[in-house]
Amino acid sequence: MEAAIAYLHFVSILSVTAFLVTELYLCGRDLQPPQVKTIAQVDFLYMLAAVAVLITGLLRLFAVGKGASFYLHNPVFYIKIALFVAVGLISILPTRQFMQWNRALKAGANRILRDDDIVTARRYIVLELALLALIPLMAVLMARGIGVQP
């Protein structure tokens, strides 16, 4: 059971990364209205993958593995959680932009994609990816006992 949950946790993390990279790819300067629906769908899948990371992470924290005492007494764990929360909060901004574009298209608007909005959404996605890249570093540090008080 422990191995299965750990595996699902890792697959969820990889999925979050894949969906963010896909968003970054789709949200280029050449973004066209037909791609807006796709990027909104990818963003929804990204959210589902992030929820899966959270659920499997909570299962690893409280139900299987090393147990809560291993994690909750390590300050590196809190840095890892803070990074995850920061990525989630930052993701709200591009998600709102994608939803706004999608609504405008459904309402029949012709010119909905402004270059500065696309650049801003891309910057947030890049920031998400940069912070996301630090989370495995925190996991490695925790696994090596960094942060544990002797």
Image (spheres, rainbow, N blue to C red):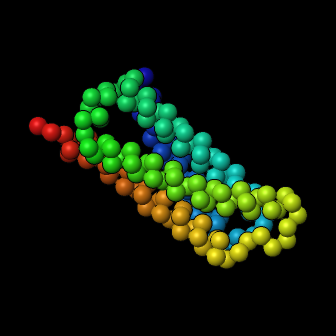
Q: Residue 103 at what x, y percent from top left?
A: 79, 57
Examine the rendered structure and indicate whether residue 62 appears above or below residue 145. Answer: above
Point out the image quarter for the C terminus.
top left
Examine the rendered structure and indicate whether residue 87 appears above or below residue 28. Answer: above
- Residue at left 65%, top 52%? 42
- Residue at left 27%, top 28%? 69
Point out the image quarter for the N terminus.
top left
Examine the rendered structure and indicate whether residue 84 appears above or below residue 98. Answer: above
From the viewer's side, name the closer residue of 56 and 99.
Answer: 99
Q: Residue 55 at what x, y percent from top left?
A: 49, 33
Q: Residue 141 at what x, y percent from top left?
A: 25, 47
- Residue at left 53%, top 44%? 50
From the viewer's side, name the closer residue of 41 and 98.
Answer: 98
- How many numbered badges does the structure rendering display? 0
From the viewer's side, name the closer residue of 115 and 20.
Answer: 115
Residue furthest to the right in view is 108
Tell me: 29 left or right of 5.
Answer: right
Confirm whether residue 22 shows in the render.
Answer: no
Q: Residue 144 at what x, y percent from top left?
A: 21, 43
Examine the rendered structure and indicate whether residue 16 appears above or below residue 29. Answer: above
- Residue at left 19%, top 40%? 148
The quarter of the displayed image where residue 143 is located: top left
Tell me: 149 left or right of 140.
Answer: left
Confirm whether residue 59 shows in the render.
Answer: yes
The quarter of the displayed image where residue 132 is located: bottom left
